[in-house]
Image: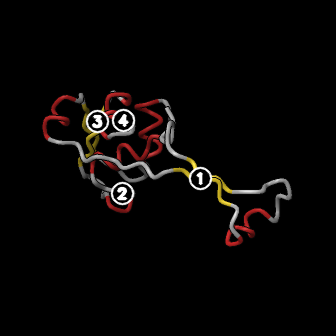
Amino acid sequence: MPRYKNKRQLRNSIEFYDFLRQPRNDVRSITHYQTVKLRNPSISDRVAIKTTNHVWKYGDRYYNLAKNYYGNPKYWWVIAWWNARPTEAHVSPGDLIVIPLNIENTLEVLGVF
Protein backbone atom coordinates (compact mmCIF):
# COMPACT_ATOMS: atom_id res chain seq x y z
CA MET A 1 0.00 0.00 0.00
CA PRO A 2 2.42 2.71 -1.03
CA ARG A 3 1.26 6.30 -0.65
CA TYR A 4 2.10 7.08 -4.26
CA LYS A 5 0.47 4.07 -5.93
CA ASN A 6 -1.31 5.16 -9.14
CA LYS A 7 0.00 8.72 -8.86
CA ARG A 8 1.27 10.62 -11.86
CA GLN A 9 5.05 10.57 -12.32
CA LEU A 10 7.28 13.20 -13.88
CA ARG A 11 10.79 12.45 -15.14
CA ASN A 12 12.88 15.53 -14.51
CA SER A 13 16.24 15.97 -16.20
CA ILE A 14 16.71 19.73 -15.83
CA GLU A 15 20.09 21.13 -14.86
CA PHE A 16 18.94 22.08 -11.36
CA TYR A 17 19.13 18.41 -10.28
CA ASP A 18 22.64 17.78 -11.61
CA PHE A 19 24.02 17.70 -8.06
CA LEU A 20 21.84 14.65 -7.37
CA ARG A 21 22.81 12.84 -10.56
CA GLN A 22 26.55 13.52 -10.64
CA PRO A 23 27.57 11.05 -7.92
CA ARG A 24 25.61 8.37 -9.83
CA ASN A 25 26.70 8.44 -13.45
CA ASP A 26 23.95 6.06 -14.55
CA VAL A 27 21.11 8.33 -13.34
CA ARG A 28 19.77 10.48 -16.18
CA SER A 29 16.67 11.93 -14.53
CA ILE A 30 14.91 12.28 -11.20
CA THR A 31 11.40 10.88 -10.73
CA HIS A 32 8.89 13.16 -9.04
CA TYR A 33 5.47 11.96 -7.92
CA GLN A 34 2.22 13.86 -7.85
CA THR A 35 1.54 15.10 -4.34
CA VAL A 36 -1.09 13.14 -2.46
CA LYS A 37 -3.88 15.42 -1.23
CA LEU A 38 -4.96 14.09 2.12
CA ARG A 39 -8.47 14.70 3.42
CA ASN A 40 -9.23 15.71 6.96
CA PRO A 41 -11.53 13.04 8.37
CA SER A 42 -15.06 14.24 9.10
CA ILE A 43 -16.84 13.48 12.34
CA SER A 44 -18.75 10.64 10.67
CA ASP A 45 -15.44 9.27 9.29
CA ARG A 46 -13.92 9.38 12.75
CA VAL A 47 -16.92 7.59 14.27
CA ALA A 48 -16.76 4.86 11.60
CA ILE A 49 -13.09 4.04 12.24
CA LYS A 50 -12.30 1.96 15.31
CA THR A 51 -9.61 3.66 17.40
CA THR A 52 -7.68 3.21 20.60
CA ASN A 53 -6.28 5.82 22.95
CA HIS A 54 -2.62 6.13 23.83
CA VAL A 55 -1.25 8.39 26.54
CA TRP A 56 1.96 9.91 25.21
CA LYS A 57 4.95 9.25 27.42
CA TYR A 58 8.56 10.38 27.38
CA GLY A 59 10.42 8.57 24.59
CA ASP A 60 7.35 7.78 22.45
CA ARG A 61 7.78 8.13 18.70
CA TYR A 62 5.18 8.01 15.95
CA TYR A 63 7.15 5.41 13.99
CA ASN A 64 7.27 3.09 17.04
CA LEU A 65 3.52 3.42 17.54
CA ALA A 66 2.94 2.70 13.84
CA LYS A 67 5.16 -0.38 14.06
CA ASN A 68 3.29 -1.62 17.14
CA TYR A 69 -0.23 -0.99 15.80
CA TYR A 70 0.22 -1.51 12.04
CA GLY A 71 3.30 -3.70 11.86
CA ASN A 72 5.01 -1.07 9.71
CA PRO A 73 6.76 2.11 10.92
CA LYS A 74 6.26 3.87 7.57
CA TYR A 75 2.65 4.67 8.56
CA TRP A 76 3.78 7.04 11.32
CA TRP A 77 2.30 9.92 9.35
CA VAL A 78 -1.23 8.43 9.66
CA ILE A 79 -1.14 8.81 13.44
CA ALA A 80 0.29 12.31 13.12
CA TRP A 81 -2.34 13.39 10.56
CA TRP A 82 -5.24 11.82 12.48
CA ASN A 83 -4.25 13.80 15.59
CA ALA A 84 -3.33 17.03 13.75
CA ARG A 85 0.10 16.93 15.37
CA PRO A 86 2.68 16.78 12.59
CA THR A 87 5.74 15.91 14.68
CA GLU A 88 6.61 14.51 18.09
CA ALA A 89 7.55 18.05 19.11
CA HIS A 90 3.83 18.87 18.99
CA VAL A 91 3.02 16.24 21.64
CA SER A 92 3.84 16.42 25.36
CA PRO A 93 4.00 13.62 27.92
CA GLY A 94 0.49 13.01 29.24
CA ASP A 95 -1.27 14.06 26.01
CA LEU A 96 -3.91 11.69 24.67
CA ILE A 97 -3.23 10.39 21.15
CA VAL A 98 -5.98 8.64 19.18
CA ILE A 99 -4.74 5.78 17.01
CA PRO A 100 -6.97 4.45 14.22
CA LEU A 101 -6.68 0.66 14.28
CA ASN A 102 -7.58 -0.43 10.73
CA ILE A 103 -4.89 1.05 8.48
CA GLU A 104 -6.64 0.16 5.19
CA ASN A 105 -9.91 1.88 6.19
CA THR A 106 -8.03 4.85 7.58
CA LEU A 107 -6.02 5.33 4.37
CA GLU A 108 -9.26 5.18 2.40
CA VAL A 109 -10.85 7.84 4.63
CA LEU A 110 -7.77 10.06 4.24
CA GLY A 111 -8.05 9.79 0.45
CA VAL A 112 -4.89 7.82 -0.21
CA PHE A 113 -6.79 5.09 -2.12
Q: Earlier in the sequence, mark 1 or mark 2?
A: 1
Q: Nearer the viewer, mark 3 or mark 2?
A: 3
Residue assigned mark 1: 10
| Furthest residue in direction right, as rendered | 25
The amino acid type found where label 3 is placed reads Val
Q: 60 or 47, which is in the foreground?
A: 47
Can you say whether 25 is above or below 61 in the image? below
Residue assigned mark 3: 109
- Distance of label 1 from label 2 (alpha carbons): 27 Å
Which residue is painted at 27% across and 49% down in the image? 83
SS at badge 2: loop
Q: Earlier in the sequence, mark 1 or mark 3?
A: 1
The amino acid type found where label 1 is placed reads Leu
Q: Earlier in the sequence, mark 3 or mark 2?
A: 2
Q: Are marks 2 and 4 in contact (CB under 8 Å)?
A: no
Residue assigned mark 4: 107
Q: Nearer the viewer, mark 1 or mark 3?
A: 1
- Distance of label 2 from label 4 (alpha carbons): 17 Å
How far across and down, in percent of the image, does residue 75 sit? 45, 40
Identify the mark at residue 74; answer none if there is no mark.
none
**Neighbours of disc 4 within 10 Å: few (<14), some (14-19), many (20+):** some
Residue assigned mark 2: 86
- Distance of label 1 from label 4 (alpha carbons): 24 Å
Q: Are marks 4 and 3 in contact (CB under 8 Å)?
A: yes
Which residue is painted at 15% across and 32% down in the image? 47
Q: Earlier in the sequence, mark 1 or mark 4?
A: 1
- Distance of label 4 from label 3 (alpha carbons): 5 Å
| Furthest residue in direction bottom, as rendered | 16
The amino acid type found where label 2 is placed reads Pro
**Neighbours of disc 1 within 10 Å: few (<14), some (14-19), many (20+):** few
